[in-house]
Each structure stands twice: as C-alpha cells, then as structure tokens.
C-alpha cells in the first residue's frame, strides 16, 4: 500500500501545487487526487506530464503521502516543508494563511 | 566606485528586454521549460522549493547607497520584505513571480545592477575582499581588475556553455579575505622582484562534493596580460573539461586528473598564441579603471579621536562592537565597520527591506555612500570616521544590526538549506540559530575568540563547510536530518580542507557536540591560540575523543 | 530543417556521411567527420566534388591545419546546446587558423545561442524548424544585443574600442 500524489510548481508564480481530482492544480494538498499503487501513480504522473501542461506547471513528480488525522501528509520532510513554507519563517508560505 | 557609461547601460537594458521576451515566449508556450530553463538560470532565476528565486549580482560585493536602497525596495515590491545575502556576495529573493521578474530586473537596471550570469555554466560574479580600497594591509585595490573581469566575462560568447559553473576571486591583500584558494581561479595580487604589481594565478580550487585547495599555475602575470591569460585558462577548460559527468565537470577535476603541470603546459601553450592579441590591455585603460575606484575625499584627520575613546570607555556595548566589528583603515582617523547580519538566533545573511534602506541611509551619512557585501554574509561600511562610529553604532543597534560578533562563533555562514533550497538534504538555518543561541553570551564568545563555523545543507557546499574551522554538513539519513562535522578547514591564505571527524550526529545531538568541541579547545589551548591554531597543533584525536569517547 | 546564411535561407548542397560506409559519387559535395578525413585523406582530396569536414566535440580543429584551403565548409556539431566546445573550435578556426570557408553550426542549434555562435565565427546555422521560422529566429537573434565587451573575430566593435574612439575624438 503506497499512496501517492502529484506535485509541481506553478509556472507563473512558482508556488507549490497538487494535481486535483478534476485535473486542475490546487495549492492545498488536501485537494489532491490520490493514487493507490504503482499503476495508478503512473497514470497520474502521465496525465500531469502532458505537453499542454507545460504552460501551466513546471516539473511534476510523485510524492509519497499518508492519510493523517488532519488529511494527507507527505512522508518526506522536504515535501512537508513544501506544503507549509520555511520552518524558520512561520509567517511565510501556506502555513501563514 | 564604478559608474556605468552608456554602453554598460545599453547592454543591461537590452538584456532586460531580451529576458522579458523570453519570459513572454515561455508563458505563451513558444518555448518549453527545457529550453527556457538555461535562459532563466543565465538571468539568475531558479525554481526552488516553494517558489522562484531571483539571485541578483553584486559585482565584487560593492554597492552604492542608491543600489542597496533599491534592493530593499525590490524586496518590498516583488518579494516578501526581505532578501538573503549569499557567500558569492550576491543577494537572493525567495518569492518573486516569474511574470514580475522582468519588471524587477528593469528596476535593477535603473540603478546599474543586474542578475546576469548569477547561475548557469558560465563565469559567475567575481568576488573580492570586502575591505578593498580601505584595508590597511592592501597592496593594491583589486576592484578595477574585478570590474574589467566583469566586463570580459559578461556574455562571453565562447564561455557561456562551459562544462560547469566557473568562479573567480581576487585578493589585493596578503591576508586573503576572499577565499581565493578555493575558487576555480584565484588571483592574488603581489609584487614581483622587479617591483611590479601583478597576480599569482591559482586554479582548480573549489568546494562541493570534491573539495580541493587550488594550485598555482603561474607565480606572476602582469596586469596587461591578465585577460589573455584568463582567456587561455578558460579555453583550455572549455575544450578539455569533462562533460560526461556533472560531478566531475569543474576545472578542479581537470587539474586533479591531468596534474597541474599538464594544465600549466596547455594554458601556457594557448596563452603564447593569444598574448599579443586584442585582449592585451594598455596602461591607459587600466589607469581609467583605477581612476573609477579612486579613494573618496577623505578628510585629513588625526588617527586619535577623543570622543571615540570616551564613548568606548563609557559604553560597554559600543566598546564590544568596536572590538569585534571595527578594523583599521588605511586612512588615519577612519575605520572599517562591519554590520553583522547574524543577530543571536537570527537567520544568517537575511536583511529586511527596512534594514537595507537604513544601511543605505547610514552609508550616505557616514561612509561616502559605499557599502560592501561579504562572502561571510555580512555588510560593511568601509570608510567611517572614527568620530562617527558611536553615532553609527547607535543607529545600527536600534535596528538589530549592531550585533558585536564578527569572526566569533556566532558569526556563522549558513546556506538556505532545506527551508528554501530544492537541492538541500537537511536544514541549515535552524541549526545555525541554535548554535548562535547556545553561544550567545558575548563574554563567552569573546573568550572563545575567532572561530568560523560554516554550515551546508547538502554536499554542494554552498555554506563552505569544508573551509570552516568547524564545518557542518547536513545530510538525510533514512528520512531524518543528520549532521557530519569536519574540523580544521580554513579559507584564508593558509587554506585547508577540513577533515571529517567521525560519524554524524542527529539534529538533537549536534549542538552539544559543537559545544564539547569548543570546551575541549578552551581546555587545551595555549595562550593566544585560535581554535584553528590549537587544532593544527594537536590534531584530530583530542577532539575525536570528546565526541566519541571510546566509540 | 533550414540553413540560414547571410540573411537568407540556403539550399543544402552537401551530403554528410558517417565515420564508415560507402561514399557518394565523386562529383557530389561531401562532408566527412574529422576522424574519417584523417583516415582517408588522400582519397578524399582526390575527389571531384567539394569537400568539407564535420567537427564533433572532442575533436581538435588543429588537425586540419594543413588542409584548410581544401575545405569549402566545416560543420561544427553541437549535439546538445549545452555542449559549448564548438564555440572554441569556431574561434580557433577563424581567428587562429584563418579559415575563410563556410563555418556552419549543426545539431542542437537554437535561437538563443545563434548570436554567440556568430560572435565565434560561424556564418551559417542549421535550425530544426521551417525556412521562414529559421530566418525570423536568426534575424531576431543577431540583432538582440548591440554592445559587446569581448574582442572576437566577428569584427563587431567592442565597448572598449568605442570608448577609446570617443576619447580620441574628445581630445
């Protein structure tokens, strides 16, 4: 069992985004479409890597997530930081809102 | 200080327009990210962990007041109210939007600044001694040559797609404050037997995953021949540097694999064919650049100032600051004052928009509008009258810029690390903050004396950990941050690469480990010895023992 | 594919062959890789058609020193635009060895590198786009900048020389 979601940075402002159920991109990881298992993840990444998305987002990739109490949480700390913002500036990034 | 003429101005404006078009083409989908990436990098635009990052060049670390003020303005207008000064004497903004960057670059161009070649496999911003033109120990001001290097290297058509990035540093003083021995090319000004001033040329130094102290390829190159000689080195590197492996592509690997004698032979052979060509610069041209960096209008003053002495005697905070942050100027009655960007517990190298504007104002008031950025991530007001130091410090201190810790254990170099950087494997900033707080007591810092701690959040070594007296490298061990300690590194004229002392420490352990190293040093030091001196005398073992015991 | 030279699109008049394999008829214009040229030099220069050599990264243009006047064209291959060795080859061929024939950039030749190539002595560019697009791109690239700091063999005046000229005029 491994849950994965696709993340990327948005082309125009560079902010972290996640691929959503309706094929859009959200700043909130809780909106993301979750792939359960390798095959589903490959499908997800393929969709996110479509050439026409090159004008929307940059560098899509899969990350491992877990279903926590408050919703989806990345397993790697690096990705946790991307969902929040710098740990040394809690007034900045998504954590500030 | 150097002022752009219409040629420089036009070049930067054309570049700004060119990048605006490139951004437009990218946003319209005319070029792919793959094609755009090298173009944005060549203009200092990275994509980092949270957002884009814009790295602005501060050529040879020299800023005018209006430029620093604009840097503050850009932080407010296009970013989130702060910037981060780097070990390349540059400044980075962490939150700009791609579609607004061309406007930011235009604002920069209006104060004769740019982000050209702050990334990419090209010749990067040339760095030098932050005290250039002011230091009492200086042989000659290196900045005229730095400016000539800036021009020679800007859009060099042959050297824009090198095997890897290329960094040049210059020192005009025998006391190397520019770390020239750990650069791709280091230039050390000195006099030859005939009494002429020229450059020792050192190649193949560098940090990163394979650190090397550079080797001398030529003891002396005259000023007129400097540029043909640089071009010869770069051509040899461009042609023969490895391109099969990104991690073996720096010139240090070429020097290491071929041997310095072979590189010397290739460079001399190449140079022999171009040395009398159009890159030879005449004394007239050199003189014009020296004139651009002529000393400001110093007043003839006595070196002793009674008020200065009185303030020192009366105000402990001020005298502490003078002791650590103020050094001798070559002009009697003046001093060089460092503005620490390392408040206890703060983020090394960060400055707010308001702080930048304040330092700009203070430089106008007290330092002939001259400000320097140091590779140790501090600022400098290079030409302050001793009589003005107290007023300066008072204003700095009110803005949390008066920390008295230059060169002390809390004056830590730290890269942005995993808090910002897409490449990092661990965080650097929180660790530097905790070390800073642990050693925050000023009397204790003063007792410890000069101790350079440098922290990198990954093997790329942007935090120069290899040349820290104590170096710390943050790594990822099965999803947890852990930190490897090196001892005995040194970036000065006695450059050396630190040695890994043993197994790494967890985030929870590492500050204690650093403290036990410092305690050991205090225990065993001889009178007058700095940490690095003691380490060199006793070696690694005593320090290993306090860290690992019998482990 | 479109080759742009002297502000126009030109025909491909050359057949490029690999390191091995048969050669076309003797009167065809032929470009061979440097290694093959060194191997079969006497046969190749005895042919009737035009002769050119292709340099790949890692080749030494100096190997052509004795034969430059037999070559009408030298192509320099940029297998990826990030491999900048070809820029040095261009300058060595033009500025040091005095090559006067056509110097053509081939491979991963993109608009944003054309000006640098031009400054290093290239005079034709083989772009992987249609004729009109290629011409538009090369034209735009060549006039994008007008100030140059480095003296190279392309003859464009450097900022330093223009400053000098201005000083002399003022004196």
Image (cartoon, coloured by chain):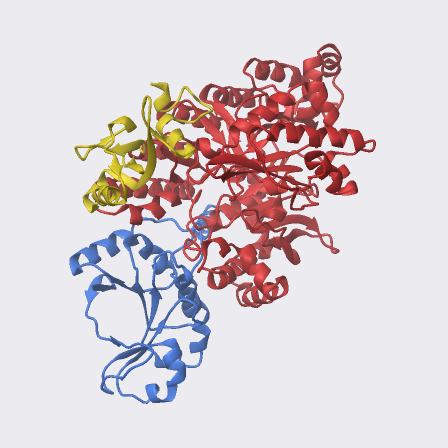
Chain colours: A yellow, B red, C blue
Name, please, the residue furthest toward the right. B527
State the residue in front, A46 or B244. A46
The quadrant holding residue C20 is: bottom left
The quadrant holding residue C88 is: bottom left
Q: Position of residue A8 (x, y in %)?
A: 30, 37
State the residue in front, B521 or B144. B521
State the residue in front, C33 or B332. C33
Viewport quadrant of the N terminus of chain C: bottom left
Would you say residue B288 is visible in this rendering?
A: no
State the residue in front, A21 or B109. A21
Q: Position of residue B28 (x, y in %)?
A: 20, 41
Residue A12 left/right relative to B296: left
Q: Is residue A11 above or below residue C74?
A: above
The number of callouts visible is 0
Q: Position of residue B216 (x, y in %)?
A: 65, 56
Residue name at image x 43 percent, y 60 percent: C152
Q: Position of residue B182 (x, y in %)?
A: 60, 47
Residue name at image x 21 percent, y 71 percent: C12
């Amino acid at each position: 069992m491994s849950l994965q979601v696709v993340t990327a940075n948005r082309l125009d402002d560079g902010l972290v985004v996640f691929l959503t159920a309706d094929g859009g991109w959200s700043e909130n990881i809780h909106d993301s479409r979750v792939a359960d298992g390798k095959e589903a993840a490959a499908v997800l990444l393929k969709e996110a890597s479509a050439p026409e998305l090159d004008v929307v987002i940059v560098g899509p990739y899969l990350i491992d997530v877990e279903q926590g109490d408050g919703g989806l949480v990345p397993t790697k700390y690096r990705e946790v930081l991307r969902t929040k913002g710098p740990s040394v500036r809690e007034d900045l990034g998504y954590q500030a809102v | 200080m150097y002022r752009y003429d219409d040629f420089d101005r036009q070049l930067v404006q054309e570049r700004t327009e060119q990048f605006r078009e490139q951004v437009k083409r990218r946003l319209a989908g005319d070029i792919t990210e793959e094609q755009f990436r090298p173009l944005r990098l060549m203009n200092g635009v990275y994509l980092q962990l949270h957002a884009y990052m814009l790295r602005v060049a501060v050529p040879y670390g020299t800023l005018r007041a209006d430029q620093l003020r604009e840097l503050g303005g850009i932080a407010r207008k296009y970013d989130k109210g702060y910037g981060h000064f780097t070990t390349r004497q540059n400044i980075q903004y962490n939150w700009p939007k791609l579609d607004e960057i061309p406007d930011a670059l235009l604002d920069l161009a209006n104060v004769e600044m740019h982000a050209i070649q702050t990334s990419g496999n090209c010749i990067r911003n040339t760095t030098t001694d932050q005290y250039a033109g002011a230091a009492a120990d200086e042989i000659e001001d290196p900045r005229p040559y730095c400016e000539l290097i800036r021009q020679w290297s800007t859009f060099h058509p042959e050297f824009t797609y090198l095997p890897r990035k290329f960094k040049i540093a210059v020192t005009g003083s025998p006391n190397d404050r520019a770390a020239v021995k750990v650069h791709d090319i280091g230039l050390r000004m000195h006099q030859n037997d005939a009494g002429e001033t020229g450059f020792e040329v050192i190649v193949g130094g560098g940090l990163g995953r394979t650190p090397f102290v550079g080797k001398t390829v030529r003891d002396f190159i005259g000023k007129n021949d400097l540029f043909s000689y640089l071009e010869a080195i770069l051509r040899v590197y461009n042609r023969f540097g490895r391109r099969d492996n990104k991690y073996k592509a720096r010139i240090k690997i070429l020097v290491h694999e071929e041997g310095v004698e072979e590189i010397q032979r290739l460079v001399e052979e190449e140079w022999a064919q171009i040395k009398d060509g159009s890159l030879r610069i005449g004394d007239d041209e050199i003189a014009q650049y020296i004139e651009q960096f002529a000393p400001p209008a110093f007043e003839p003053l006595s070196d002793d100032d009674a008020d200065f002495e009185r303030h020192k005697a009366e105000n402990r905070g001020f005298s502490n600051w003078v002791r650590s942050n103020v050094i001798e100027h070559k002009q009697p009655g003046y001093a060089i004052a460092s503005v620490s960007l390392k408040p206890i517990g703060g983020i090394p190298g960060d400055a707010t928009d308001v702080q930048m504007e304040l330092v700009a104002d203070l430089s106008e008031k007290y330092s002939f509008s001259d400000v320097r950025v140091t590779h140790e991530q501090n600022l400098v007001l290079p030409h302050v009258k001793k009589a003005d130091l107290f007023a300066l410090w008072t204003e700095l201190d009110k803005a949390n810029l008066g920390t008295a810790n230059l060169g002390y254990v809390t004056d830590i170099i730290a890269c942005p690390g995993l808090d910002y950087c897409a490449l990092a494997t661990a965080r650097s900033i929180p660790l530097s903050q905790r070390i800073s707080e642990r050693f925050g007591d000023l009397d204790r810092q003063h007792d410890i004396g000069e101790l350079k701690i440098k922290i990198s959040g990954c093997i790329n070594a942007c935090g120069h950990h290899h040349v820290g007296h104590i170096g710390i490298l943050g790594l990822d061990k099965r999803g947890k941050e852990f930190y490897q300690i090196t001892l005995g590194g040194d970036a000065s004229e006695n450059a050396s690469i630190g040695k890994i002392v043993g197994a790494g420490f967890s985030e929870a352990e590492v500050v204690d480990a650093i403290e036990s190293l410092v305690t050991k040093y205090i225990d065993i030091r001889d009178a007058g010895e700095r940490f690095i001196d003691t380490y060199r005398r006793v070696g690694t073992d005593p320090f290993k023992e306090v860290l690992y015991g019998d482990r | 594919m479109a080759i742009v030279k002297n502000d126009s699109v030109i025909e491909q008049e050359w057949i490029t062959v690999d390191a091995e394999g048969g050669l076309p008829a003797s009167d065809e214009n032929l470009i061979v890789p440097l290694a093959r040229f060194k191997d079969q030099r006497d046969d190749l220069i005895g042919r009737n058609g035009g002769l050119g050599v292709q340099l790949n990264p890692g080749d030494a243009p100096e190997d052509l020193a004795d034969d430059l006047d037999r070559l009408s064209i030298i192509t320099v291959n940029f297998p990826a635009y990030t491999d900048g060795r070809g820029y040095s080859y261009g300058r060595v061929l033009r500025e040091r060895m005095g090559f006067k024939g056509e110097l053509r950039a081939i491979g991963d030749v993109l608009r944003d590198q054309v000006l640098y190539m031009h400054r290093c002595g290239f005079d034709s560019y083989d772009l992987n786009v249609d004729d009109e697009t290629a011409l538009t791109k090369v034209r735009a690239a060549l006039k994008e900048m007008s100030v140059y700091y480095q003296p190279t063999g392309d003859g464009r005046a450097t900022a330093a020389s223009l400053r000098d000229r201005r000083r002399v005029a003022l004196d």
